[in-house]
Image: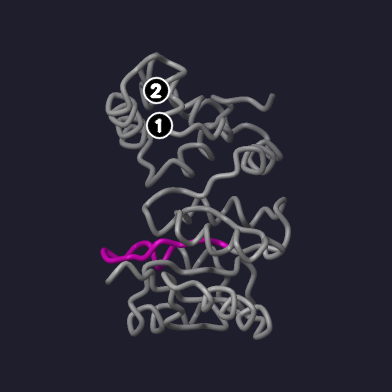
Amino acid sequence: MSDGTTRVVIVDDEPLVRAGLRVILGTEPDLEVVGEAGDGAEVPGVVARARPDVVLMDVRMPRVDGIAATRALLARDDAPRVLVLTTFENDDHVLDALRAGAHGFLLKRARPEEVAQAVRVVARGESLLFPDAVRRLATARPPAGDELRAAHLTEREGEVLRLVAQGLSNAEIAGELYLGVETVRTHVGNVLAKLGVRDRTQAVVRAYESGFVRAG
């Protein structure tokens, strides 16, 4: 991010979708579209040239899909943030993309202001997490067994993870557990490290998939 402007690359196999997103983001003074790609195979080259802060990544593309493209992109040391685009929130590909390291997902039918705000949220280093949608996706598959048991979370860390899975912010978790925000931030960091995940989104996916956090 330079001069307060967030640089964005749009990846979608539909030219009309790319054009629409370019118009939406182009009207925002703090957002700049610096590149486009029509398939995941083009992403490494475009990202290397454009050096974006955020990549808007279509999840379904004909040659290299958004899951493989996200996985390859986030293996880089200087990887941008990835925000997955999808038509349907119950798309299994979304869950796979989140597992691959995407920092959140956005429906293509989102309002223009929601698209712009989603890019800003992800650019700030936060995860764009919709707990209900992630829960539905993760619990649609049988639990893989409580894999989190091997992570040896403390009781407090388990409480924090369950509240993260509900979509609470660090400040909200602090209020819920009568802790300081810095203490909560430390607990969240410990949870991510013990689970071996990149961010809160991946932690929530793991929590639901393992059955550690159950629907309802």
Which residue is the site of mark 1?
170
Name above or below for residue 211 compared with residue 116: above
Q: Does 83 appear in magenta?
A: yes
Q: CA distance from mark 2 to mark 1?
A: 6 Å
Residue at x-position 62% and y-position 42%: 134
Q: Residues within 10 Å of mark 2 (few under 14, many from 20)?
A: some
Count of labels in the image: 2
Which residue is the site of mark 2?
174
Residue at x-position 69% and y-position 24%: 216
Q: Nearer the viewer, residue 4 or 160?
A: 4
Tell me which segment is drawn in magenta: 71-84
Residue 84: horizontal and vertical position, in percent?
A: 56, 61
Disc sitting over residue 207 in the figure = none
Name above or below for residue 38 compared with residue 121: below
Color style of the picture: one colour
Which amino acid type corresponds to the residue marked 1 in the rendered image? Asn
- Identify the element where label 2 is drawn: helix
Residue at x-position 73% and y-position 58%: 88
Q: Is residue 118 left or right of residue 49?
A: right
Q: Quadrant of residue 73?
A: bottom left
Residue 119: horizontal and vertical position, in percent?
A: 48, 62
Which amino acid type corresponds to the residue marked 2 in the rendered image? Ala
Name above or below for residue 152 compared with residue 24: above
Name above or below for residue 35 compared with residue 160: below
Q: Quadrant of residue 17?
A: bottom right
User: In the rendered structure, are the residues bearing label 2 and label 1 in contact, judged by CB atoms less than 8 Å apart?
Assistant: yes
Residue 158: horizontal and vertical position, in percent?
A: 43, 20
